[in-house]
Amino acid sequence: MPRSIQPSPVARVLAAVLLASALGACEIRHDDAGDEDVIPTDVVIPSGEPSATPSPSGVSIIREDVIETPEPTPEPPEPLDVVLPFADGTDVSPDAEELLQLVLQSDALRAGWPITLAGHTDSAGNDQANLRASRSRAENVAAWLIERGVANERITVIAFGEQNPLVPNAKPDGSPDEVARRRNRRVELTIAPPPADDTKPVENEGDTTQAS
């Protein structure tokens, strides 16, 4: 009959220690494997680099910056200066009416700025008659604009008569220059922003009235 061999007390203690070490190693490996599935919550993702991995809480951590581009400020219109010819008489001439049609389409008119109409004549006739003629020309232009929807409160009429010719009314030898006189018979239309003190500009010393 074979003899039963019993392990010594030292062998039993050593076996228990080895078994405990083996079990501890398994737990460590299990913990390490679990750490690989954990998503850190303090990761900072730079703006513009979206992450394909959702956050554990289900809330997106992608930074969404909304940049609004401001609309460009439109440039203000330029002031308008137009010379309206009056070759003969005081009625609005076809040439002047053609220019006035362009004035109606201008940005300066749509801006609502004040309108100044300065009437002029040549040097023929006496001063008072020329003053009346220059006023009549400017007032006829004002009436043309008002009939087409321009507010009369915007319009100021100035009568200069023969005071401010564009060119000399006579030739160097003193004889009348009919071509030059025709150029001097005119109405100068100006549309510009009001001055800072809210007064209307007046050139030289003309006879100024408000259009009606």
Image: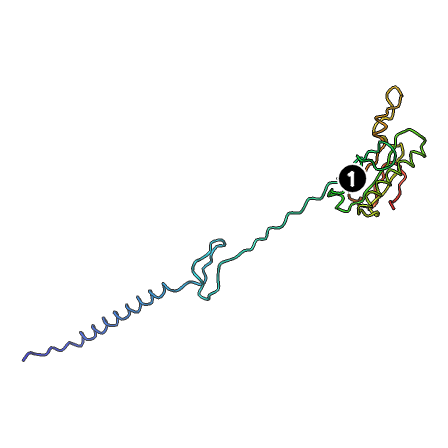
Please give the name of the residue rendered at 39% of the width and 64% of the height, measured from the top-left corner: 38
Percent of width and height locating residue 93: 82, 35
**Residue ranking furthest to the top:** 173
Q: The disc labelled 1 sits on which kind of residue?
A: Leu
Q: Residue at x 89, y 41 (%)?
A: 208
* Image quadrant occupied by the N terminus: bottom left
Residue furthest to the front: 94
Of residues 28 and 30, the one nearer the viewer is 30
Image check: 43 left or right of 111? left
Q: Residue at x 46, y 65 (%)?
A: 58
Residue at the disc numbered 1: 100
Side of 78 relative to 32 (left or right): right
The image position of residue 81, as x and y in percent, is 78, 37
**What SS does tag 1 mark?**
helix
Q: Is residue 67 above or below residue 31?
A: above
Question: As drawn, which residue projects farthest toward the bottom?
Answer: 1
Residue 84 pos. (x, y %): 81, 35
> Quarter-wise, where is residue 174 in the image?
top right
Q: Nearer the viewer, residue 115 or 137?
A: 137
Crowding at dot 1, Cα within 10 Å, few <14 / some 14-19 / many 20+, comes out as many
Whether 181 is drawn above or below 99: the answer is: above
